[in-house]
Amino acid sequence: MNELISGHSETFQRVLAKVELYAPHPWPALILGETGVGKELIARKLHELSSRRSMPFIPINCSAMPPGLFESELFGYEKGAFSGAINGSRGLLRMAHGGTLFLDEMGELDVNLQAKILRLIDSGEVRSVGSQKIEHVNIRIIAATNVDLHTAVAAGQFRQDLLERLCVLSLKVPPLRERIEDIPLIARAILERLGAQFSSDDLNCLTQFDWPGNVRQLRNILIRATVLGKMRIQDTLLKQLMVEEEKERLVITQSPERAPLLDGHLEDIERDIIVDRLKKHHGNRKETAKDLGIAKSTLHDKLRKWKEDPSVKKSWPVARWASPLGLT
């Protein structure tokens, strides 16, 4: 997937220059950037250009792993160390020995677990859960986050001493909107891999979009366009998909505190999306709000506003408790 981290823009060339400069060194590195900019791909590039390239690259999503499992998954555990530990485990750190450990979404890691990463960086010590034996591992740690860690430190959500150790070498990956000239290049590489037919003129429209989801969003829209266009990419289809994407983004980011509800045909689209998600979750407003990325109170306000609209009420799914969404 190296095509996702290509680019000729001056902004991105500076990033690639830092990658080449940082790669040979063993020190921890911190990669910053918005969601979807390709932070893991940059981490892999650091690994591939280092002397550790023949050894494992072990990625860990800190936000996806439950806190209760994090320590045992990383450090391993002895047989019988806890309920369900039928067999022992070496742990991911031992698997990464000689290579690179990539801690993605580092800003989401529980504060209590941050101390264990701090000790690992300082000493390289590994002790399995349920064991007194201490071993040492030789790994390079690369972390990534879209969180402002200095703000997190001020809020007591991230350790200052851990931040100081992680950002020995740091780089920030720019969002697509700051390197617009790279968009056609990245899109062309993705489409060539997909085997789609396209022209340069068809890709020019991509530079007109803000790309809040960055490279990941660009890739997803191109895959969608490839499927819908039956392997032929045209600017009319791309424009249509980008408009639909923007409309849905407006829906899930709208709140009474920030802006009024969408007007006109955009409100119709908003309503259709919400009805669809309600059906998906069988009328469960809590799960629907979570899926949309909005507060439950925001969803409630929207439903209350549309309560008397007969065209909408026909479409309301029945909640699992057998009342129409509890709108009363």
Image: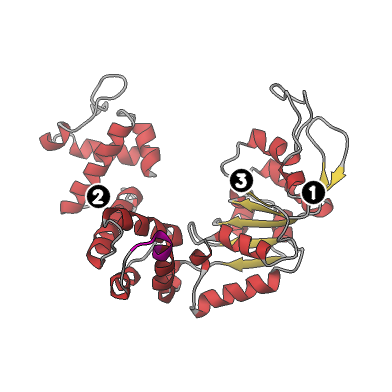
Q: Residues within 10 Å of mark 3 (few under 14, many from 20)?
A: many
Q: Secondary structure at mark 3?
A: loop
Q: Is disc 1 in contact with disc 3, using a CB cutoff of under 8 Å?
A: no
Q: How far, Cα to Cα, is label 1 from label 3?
A: 17 Å
Q: CA distance from mark 3 to mark 2?
A: 35 Å
Q: Position of residue 170 (x, y in %)?
A: 65, 66
Callout 2 environment at 10 Å: few (<14), some (14 to 19), or many (20+)? some
Magenta stretch encompasses residue 194: yes
Q: Residue furthest top?
A: 322
Q: Nearer the viewer, residue 149 or 16?
A: 16
Q: Which residue is mark 2?
A: 261
Find residue 315 and report its image quarter. top left
**Mark 3–mark 2 contact, CB under 8 Å?**
no
Q: Amino acid at mark 1?
A: Arg
Q: Which residue is mark 1?
A: 119
**Secondary structure found at label 2:** loop
Please determine whether, in this image, residue 97 is positioned above or below residue 194: above
Q: Is residue 241 visible?
A: yes
Name the residue that disc number 3 marks: 62
The magenta segment: 191-196
Residue 207 % position (x, y): 34, 71
Q: Residues within 10 Å of mark 1 (few under 14, many from 20)?
A: few
Q: Relative to 318, is 194 on the left or the right?
A: right
Query: At 49% from the left edge and 66% from the top edge, which residue is drawn?
Result: 3
Element under label 1? helix
C-alpha span from label 2 to label 1: 49 Å
Left-right relation of 134 to 199: right
> Which of the two discs, 2 and 1, labels the residue nearer the N terminus?
1
Front residue (pair 235, 306): 235
**Residue 171 lies within the magenta run:** no
**Horizontal and vertical percent position of residue 144:** 61, 57
